[in-house]
Amino acid sequence: MSEAKRLAGEKAIDYVEDGMIVGVGTGSTVAYFIDALGRIRDRIAGAVSSSEQSTARLRALGIEVLDANAAGPLKLYVDGADECDPHKRLIKGGGAALTREKIIAEASETFVCIVDPAKQVPVLGRFPLPVEVVPMARSLVARRILALTGGQPVWRDGVVTDNGNWILDVHNLSITDPVAMETELNQIPGVVSVGLFARRPADVVIVGGEPPRVL
Ligand code: 5RP
Protein backbone atom coordinates (compact mmCIF):
# COMPACT_ATOMS: atom_id res chain seq x y z
CA MET A 1 0.00 0.00 0.00
CA SER A 2 1.36 3.41 -0.90
CA GLU A 3 -0.36 6.76 -0.72
CA ALA A 4 1.79 8.10 -3.57
CA LYS A 5 0.74 5.20 -5.81
CA ARG A 6 -2.92 5.77 -4.97
CA LEU A 7 -2.68 9.49 -5.75
CA ALA A 8 -0.97 8.80 -9.10
CA GLY A 9 -3.47 6.10 -10.05
CA GLU A 10 -6.48 8.23 -9.24
CA LYS A 11 -5.08 11.28 -11.07
CA ALA A 12 -4.88 9.27 -14.30
CA ILE A 13 -8.68 9.19 -14.40
CA ASP A 14 -8.46 12.79 -15.68
CA TYR A 15 -7.33 11.33 -19.04
CA VAL A 16 -10.31 8.99 -19.46
CA GLU A 17 -12.97 10.26 -21.85
CA ASP A 18 -16.54 9.06 -22.19
CA GLY A 19 -16.98 6.01 -24.43
CA MET A 20 -13.29 5.10 -24.42
CA ILE A 21 -11.75 1.67 -24.54
CA VAL A 22 -8.93 2.10 -22.03
CA GLY A 23 -5.60 0.27 -22.19
CA VAL A 24 -4.74 -0.96 -18.71
CA GLY A 25 -1.30 -1.95 -17.41
CA THR A 26 -0.28 -4.12 -14.48
CA GLY A 27 0.95 -3.66 -10.93
CA SER A 28 0.11 -2.16 -7.56
CA THR A 29 -0.10 1.43 -8.86
CA VAL A 30 -2.38 0.37 -11.71
CA ALA A 31 -4.58 -1.44 -9.19
CA TYR A 32 -5.52 1.98 -7.80
CA PHE A 33 -6.29 3.19 -11.33
CA ILE A 34 -8.48 0.14 -11.96
CA ASP A 35 -10.37 0.73 -8.73
CA ALA A 36 -11.00 4.34 -9.76
CA LEU A 37 -12.03 3.17 -13.24
CA GLY A 38 -14.54 0.87 -11.58
CA ARG A 39 -16.22 3.92 -10.04
CA ILE A 40 -16.85 5.38 -13.53
CA ARG A 41 -17.36 2.09 -15.36
CA ASP A 42 -20.65 3.24 -16.92
CA ARG A 43 -18.79 6.02 -18.74
CA ILE A 44 -16.35 3.74 -20.60
CA ALA A 45 -16.80 1.13 -23.32
CA GLY A 46 -14.37 -1.33 -21.77
CA ALA A 47 -10.68 -2.08 -21.31
CA VAL A 48 -7.82 -3.89 -23.02
CA SER A 49 -5.77 -5.59 -20.33
CA SER A 50 -2.03 -6.31 -20.15
CA SER A 51 -2.20 -9.30 -17.78
CA GLU A 52 -4.38 -12.00 -16.28
CA GLN A 53 -3.97 -10.19 -12.95
CA SER A 54 -5.41 -6.92 -14.27
CA THR A 55 -8.10 -8.76 -16.22
CA ALA A 56 -9.36 -10.40 -13.02
CA ARG A 57 -9.45 -7.06 -11.18
CA LEU A 58 -11.23 -5.30 -14.06
CA ARG A 59 -13.85 -8.04 -14.39
CA ALA A 60 -14.45 -8.13 -10.64
CA LEU A 61 -15.43 -4.46 -10.89
CA GLY A 62 -17.81 -5.10 -13.79
CA ILE A 63 -15.56 -3.64 -16.51
CA GLU A 64 -15.68 -5.50 -19.82
CA VAL A 65 -12.28 -6.72 -21.01
CA LEU A 66 -11.91 -6.67 -24.78
CA ASP A 67 -9.55 -8.50 -27.09
CA ALA A 68 -6.73 -6.25 -28.34
CA ASN A 69 -7.25 -7.36 -31.95
CA ALA A 70 -10.93 -6.47 -31.84
CA ALA A 71 -10.34 -3.16 -30.07
CA GLY A 72 -7.82 -1.82 -32.62
CA PRO A 73 -5.92 1.43 -31.98
CA LEU A 74 -6.47 2.87 -28.49
CA LYS A 75 -6.55 6.49 -27.42
CA LEU A 76 -5.24 5.90 -23.91
CA TYR A 77 -2.96 3.50 -22.06
CA VAL A 78 -2.32 3.83 -18.34
CA ASP A 79 0.47 1.83 -16.71
CA GLY A 80 3.09 1.98 -13.97
CA ALA A 81 6.86 1.58 -14.22
CA ASP A 82 9.83 0.34 -12.24
CA GLU A 83 12.01 3.29 -13.29
CA CYS A 84 11.44 6.51 -15.20
CA ASP A 85 14.13 8.85 -16.54
CA PRO A 86 13.79 12.59 -17.31
CA HIS A 87 12.92 11.78 -20.95
CA LYS A 88 9.96 9.59 -19.87
CA ARG A 89 11.83 6.45 -20.91
CA LEU A 90 11.05 3.53 -18.66
CA ILE A 91 12.10 0.20 -17.25
CA LYS A 92 9.08 -2.07 -16.89
CA GLY A 93 8.42 -5.73 -16.27
CA GLY A 94 8.87 -6.05 -12.52
CA GLY A 95 5.47 -7.75 -12.62
CA ALA A 96 6.51 -9.91 -15.62
CA ALA A 97 3.82 -8.38 -17.86
CA LEU A 98 6.20 -6.43 -20.11
CA THR A 99 5.31 -8.05 -23.46
CA ARG A 100 1.60 -7.36 -23.34
CA GLU A 101 2.32 -3.96 -21.81
CA LYS A 102 4.57 -3.12 -24.74
CA ILE A 103 1.96 -4.24 -27.26
CA ILE A 104 -0.68 -2.01 -25.71
CA ALA A 105 1.72 0.94 -25.39
CA GLU A 106 2.52 0.62 -29.09
CA ALA A 107 -1.17 0.48 -29.99
CA SER A 108 -2.00 3.59 -27.98
CA GLU A 109 -2.04 7.25 -28.93
CA THR A 110 -1.28 8.46 -25.40
CA PHE A 111 0.66 6.51 -22.78
CA VAL A 112 0.15 7.89 -19.28
CA CYS A 113 2.66 6.43 -16.83
CA ILE A 114 1.81 6.53 -13.13
CA VAL A 115 4.63 6.30 -10.60
CA ASP A 116 5.59 7.08 -7.04
CA PRO A 117 8.56 9.44 -6.62
CA ALA A 118 10.97 6.58 -5.85
CA LYS A 119 10.72 5.45 -9.47
CA GLN A 120 12.34 8.61 -10.84
CA VAL A 121 16.03 8.19 -11.74
CA PRO A 122 18.53 10.28 -13.73
CA VAL A 123 19.80 7.20 -15.64
CA LEU A 124 17.96 3.89 -16.10
CA GLY A 125 19.48 0.66 -14.83
CA ARG A 126 19.48 0.62 -11.04
CA PHE A 127 16.38 -1.59 -11.24
CA PRO A 128 17.38 -4.90 -12.89
CA LEU A 129 16.21 -4.86 -16.52
CA PRO A 130 13.59 -7.58 -17.19
CA VAL A 131 13.87 -9.47 -20.48
CA GLU A 132 11.20 -12.02 -21.48
CA VAL A 133 12.71 -15.04 -23.23
CA VAL A 134 11.51 -18.22 -24.89
CA PRO A 135 12.46 -20.90 -22.32
CA MET A 136 14.84 -22.88 -24.60
CA ALA A 137 16.82 -19.69 -25.33
CA ARG A 138 17.36 -18.69 -21.68
CA SER A 139 21.00 -19.63 -21.51
CA LEU A 140 21.90 -18.35 -25.00
CA VAL A 141 20.23 -15.01 -24.34
CA ALA A 142 21.97 -14.70 -20.95
CA ARG A 143 25.37 -15.25 -22.57
CA ARG A 144 24.66 -12.72 -25.31
CA ILE A 145 23.42 -10.09 -22.86
CA LEU A 146 26.52 -10.51 -20.71
CA ALA A 147 28.77 -10.12 -23.75
CA LEU A 148 26.89 -7.14 -25.18
CA THR A 149 26.20 -5.14 -22.04
CA GLY A 150 28.43 -6.43 -19.23
CA GLY A 151 25.27 -6.70 -17.11
CA GLN A 152 24.60 -9.82 -15.02
CA PRO A 153 21.48 -11.72 -16.18
CA VAL A 154 19.68 -13.60 -13.39
CA TRP A 155 16.89 -16.07 -14.15
CA ARG A 156 13.68 -15.18 -12.28
CA ASP A 157 13.33 -18.79 -11.24
CA GLY A 158 9.79 -20.09 -10.84
CA VAL A 159 8.13 -17.24 -12.76
CA VAL A 160 6.26 -18.09 -15.96
CA THR A 161 4.77 -15.17 -17.88
CA ASP A 162 1.19 -15.04 -19.14
CA ASN A 163 2.69 -15.99 -22.52
CA GLY A 164 4.37 -19.14 -21.17
CA ASN A 165 7.87 -17.65 -21.22
CA TRP A 166 10.62 -16.93 -18.68
CA ILE A 167 12.23 -13.74 -17.37
CA LEU A 168 15.89 -12.77 -17.09
CA ASP A 169 16.62 -9.77 -14.84
CA VAL A 170 19.79 -7.98 -15.91
CA HIS A 171 21.69 -6.42 -12.99
CA ASN A 172 24.45 -3.80 -12.86
CA LEU A 173 23.51 -1.80 -15.94
CA SER A 174 23.89 1.93 -16.45
CA ILE A 175 21.75 2.56 -19.51
CA THR A 176 23.02 5.79 -21.03
CA ASP A 177 21.50 5.06 -24.48
CA PRO A 178 18.23 3.21 -23.81
CA VAL A 179 17.04 3.32 -27.44
CA ALA A 180 20.25 1.66 -28.65
CA MET A 181 20.17 -0.99 -25.93
CA GLU A 182 16.49 -1.77 -26.54
CA THR A 183 17.14 -2.13 -30.26
CA GLU A 184 20.23 -4.30 -29.77
CA LEU A 185 18.73 -6.68 -27.22
CA ASN A 186 15.60 -7.06 -29.35
CA GLN A 187 17.77 -8.67 -32.07
CA ILE A 188 18.88 -11.66 -29.97
CA PRO A 189 17.02 -14.79 -31.10
CA GLY A 190 14.81 -16.00 -28.27
CA VAL A 191 14.17 -12.55 -26.82
CA VAL A 192 10.43 -11.95 -26.76
CA SER A 193 10.65 -8.44 -25.41
CA VAL A 194 12.91 -6.15 -23.46
CA GLY A 195 11.61 -4.16 -20.49
CA LEU A 196 13.03 -0.92 -21.85
CA PHE A 197 10.30 1.44 -23.05
CA ALA A 198 12.56 3.92 -24.84
CA ARG A 199 11.67 3.64 -28.53
CA ARG A 200 8.09 4.21 -27.42
CA PRO A 201 8.40 6.14 -24.12
CA ALA A 202 5.54 7.48 -22.02
CA ASP A 203 3.85 10.66 -23.23
CA VAL A 204 2.78 11.82 -19.78
CA VAL A 205 4.20 10.85 -16.38
CA ILE A 206 2.15 11.37 -13.24
CA VAL A 207 4.23 11.34 -10.06
CA GLY A 208 2.07 10.58 -7.05
CA GLY A 209 2.09 13.12 -4.23
CA GLU A 210 -0.07 15.77 -2.61
CA PRO A 211 -0.77 17.15 -5.17
CA PRO A 212 0.31 14.77 -7.97
CA ARG A 213 2.87 16.23 -10.41
CA VAL A 214 2.18 15.88 -14.14
CA LEU A 215 5.30 15.80 -16.33
C1 5RP B 1 4.60 -4.88 -14.52
C2 5RP B 1 5.16 -3.51 -14.54
C3 5RP B 1 4.71 -2.56 -13.48
O1 5RP B 1 4.19 -1.42 -14.08
C4 5RP B 1 5.89 -2.19 -12.62
O2 5RP B 1 6.47 -3.36 -12.10
C5 5RP B 1 5.49 -1.26 -11.48
O3 5RP B 1 4.75 -1.94 -10.54
P1 5RP B 1 4.16 -1.25 -9.24
O4 5RP B 1 3.12 -0.28 -9.68
O5 5RP B 1 3.58 -2.41 -8.46
O6 5RP B 1 5.29 -0.59 -8.50
O7 5RP B 1 5.93 -3.14 -15.38
O8 5RP B 1 5.18 -5.69 -15.49
Image (tube, grey):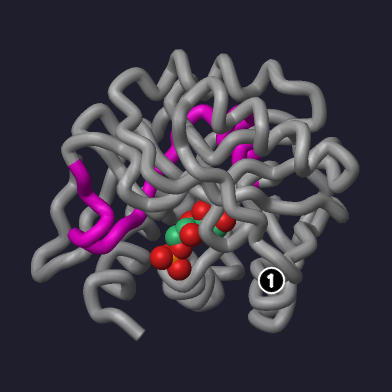
Which residue is situated farthest in the left direction here?
210
User: Residue 143 in the image: x percent, y percent?
Assistant: 66, 32
The quadrant in which the N terminus is found is bottom left
User: Residue 15 in the image: x percent, y percent?
Assistant: 38, 48
Is the residue marked by circle 1 packed among few (<14), some (14-19), or many (20+) residues within 10 Å? some
**148 to 126, vertically: above or below:** above
**162 to 215, vertically: above or below:** below
User: Residue 194 in the image: x percent, y percent?
Assistant: 60, 35
* Residue 64 seen in render: no
Task: Tell me, yes or no, whether the highlighted magenta stretch contains residue 109.
Answer: yes
> Circle 1 is placed at which residue position?
53
Q: Is residue 189 left or right of residue 5?
A: right
Label 1: state its secondary structure. Answer: helix
- Which residue is drawn at the image coordinates 32% and 74% (left, top)? 6
Q: Closest to the observer: 52 or 140?
A: 140
- Which residue is drawn at the image coordinates 14% and 67% (left, top)? 209
- Which residue is drawn at the image coordinates 49% and 47% (left, top)? 92
Q: Which residues are magenta?
A: 101-121
* Residue 59 seen in render: yes
User: Residue 16 in the image: x percent, y percent?
Assistant: 45, 51
Q: Closest to the observer: 24 or 181?
A: 181
Task: Tell me, yes or no, whether the highlighted magenta stretch contains residue 88.
Answer: no
Q: Is residue 55 left or right of residue 18?
A: right
Q: Amino acid at mark 1?
A: Gln
